[in-house]
């Protein structure tokens, strides 16, 4: 039993050593903080926020505590510097609250963590070269039961924060349908869709997916989310028009325009997905297209209401990593636009109040 726990821990560390994703996220944040410190006249706040949140997200969703209590106790003997999992994420929160604008100090602190992680991963890599020669092969190759080789994490945030069991059941049912539509597209109908994690407070669900299904999902999501830019512009016009008494119902006309944009975008994206991924019976293509069209609109609605997702493509997949980066940038832009939309009415009200005095 102790040997199996040790192997489980080593498999986790080995995967981190091979993928280098966590190290890259630490390095990215450190670099942005260093640039912000060296260029105080420039505004790096949004880039730093996005990088910090991506690092925290990765730490929480690749949390070694998911291996189980016994394995985690073994793991803590290796991670004496708390560079993995929830302790590292908590440290980052504490650090940014304590010194929110001291970019030099923040950069140095994140740099220390990054160097510690680099040394640990290097040691794991060297150790494993010897370890493979003396341990039974079938034990080494026994995968960690809860590891996610490819898949995505769904963040139920904003208006979508899960408040009850019934809401959780509804959201999982909706997303099961969305994922199923993409498995039909990629030809992985027999794939088992298993929700692998529900984290307290952050309301996160993890879904294991085949690589081809995940690629199709990311490509489709990028396509439908592209419509949000023009939709947000129209929403702002509707907001400006709402106080006016007009002879025509321009609000509803703009609402109809939004529906048209969503329909046209979804239709175009579905056509691209079918051309790129669908290889099954042509007689079923209409049903698959309808399911995809509905799923894309549900993904758009999910993002508009404050939800987001982070994908985990197969290590070394350049296309997967590029699609994932595009999605991360899209969600960052969506949140920036939403925060701007909240600020603008307040600023406008303040200006009007000042003019009235």
Image (cartoon, rainbow, N blue to C red):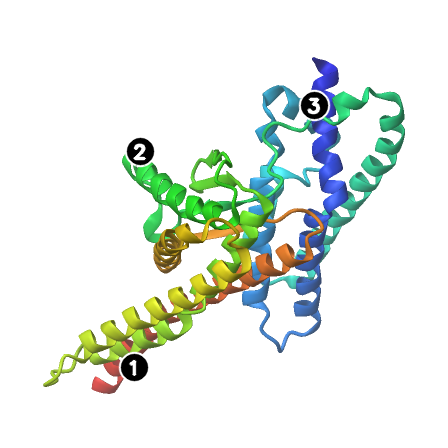
Q: Nearer the viewer, residue 105 or 151?
A: 151
**Residue of label 2:** 165
**Residue drawn at (60%, 46%), measured in percent from left and top?**
211
**Residue drawn at (15%, 82%), measured in percent from left and top?**
244
Q: For numbered disc 1, what is the local secondary structure?
A: helix
Above or below residue 44? Residue 306 is above
Q: For numbered disc 3, what is the local secondary structure?
A: helix
Q: Residues within 10 Å of mark 1 (few under 14, many from 20)?
A: few
Q: Nearer the viewer, residue 31 or 133?
A: 133
Give the CA separation, mark 2 to mark 3: 34 Å
Earlier in the chain: of badge 1 and badge 2, it is: 2
| Left or right, residue 109 beside residue 127 | left
Q: Residues within 10 Å of mark 3 (few under 14, many from 20)?
A: some
**Residue drawn at (54%, 53%), measured in percent from left and top?**
97
Quarter of the image where one finds residue 329: bottom right
Give the CA separation, mark 1 to mark 2: 44 Å
Quarter of the image where one finds residue 290: bottom left
**Residue of label 3:** 74
Q: Nearer the viewer, residue 345 or 324?
A: 324
Identify the image quadrant of the N terminus. Answer: top right
Residue 319 on image: x %, y %? 65, 58
Residue 157 on image: x %, y %? 39, 50
Above or below residue 55? Residue 353 is below
| Left or right, residue 208 beside residue 176 | right
Earlier in the chain: of badge 3 and badge 1, it is: 3
Identify the image quadrant of the C terminus. Answer: bottom left
Residue 283 on image: x %, y %? 40, 52
Q: Are marks 2 and 3 in contact (CB under 8 Å)?
A: no
**Residue drawn at (59%, 55%), measured in percent from left and top?**
52
- Give residue 351's mark: 1
């Amino acid at each position: 039993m102790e040997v199996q726990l040790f192997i489980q821990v080593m498999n986790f560390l080995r995967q981190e050593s091979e993928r280098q994703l966590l190290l890259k996220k630490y390095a990215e944040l450190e670099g942005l903080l260093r640039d912000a410190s060296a260029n105080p006249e420039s505004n790096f706040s949004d880039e730093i926020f996005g990088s910090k949140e991506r690092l925290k997200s990765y730490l929480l969703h690749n949390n070694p505590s998911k291996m189980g209590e016994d394995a985690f106790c073994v793991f803590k003997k290796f991670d004496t510097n708390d560079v993995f999992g929830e302790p590292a994420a908590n440290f980052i929160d504490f650090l940014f609250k304590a010194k929110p604008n001291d970019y030099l100090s923040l950069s140095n602190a994140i740099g220390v963590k990054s160097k510690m992680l680099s040394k640990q991963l290097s040691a794991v890599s060297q150790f494993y070269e010897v370890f493979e020669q003396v341990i039974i092969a079938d034990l080494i190759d026994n995968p960690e039961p809860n590891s996610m080789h490819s898949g995505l994490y769904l963040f139920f945030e904003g208006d979508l924060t899960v408040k009850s069991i019934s809401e959780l059941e509804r959201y999982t049912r909706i997303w099961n349908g969305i994922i199923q539509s993409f498995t039909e597209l990629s030809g992985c109908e027999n794939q088992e869709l298993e929700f692998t994690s529900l984290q307290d407070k952050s309301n996160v669900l993890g879904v294991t997916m085949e690589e081809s299904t995940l690629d199709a999902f990311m490509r489709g999501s990028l396509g439908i989310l592209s419509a949000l830019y023009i939709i947000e512009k129209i929403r702002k016009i509707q907001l400006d028009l709402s106080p006016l008494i007009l002879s025509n119902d321009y609000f509803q006309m703009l609402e109809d325009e939004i529906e048209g944009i969503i329909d046209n975008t979804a239709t175009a994206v579905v056509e691209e997905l079918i051309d790129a991924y669908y290889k099954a019976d042509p007689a079923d293509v209409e049903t698959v297209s309808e399911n995809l069209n509905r799923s894309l609109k549900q993904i758009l609605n999910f993002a508009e209401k404050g939800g987001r997702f982070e994908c985990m493509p197969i290590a070394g997949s350049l296309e997967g990593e590029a699609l994932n980066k595009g999605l991360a940038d899209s969600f960052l832009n969506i949140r920036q636009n939403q925060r701007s939309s909240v600020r603008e009415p307040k600023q406008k009200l303040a200006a009007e109040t000042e003019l009235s005095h």
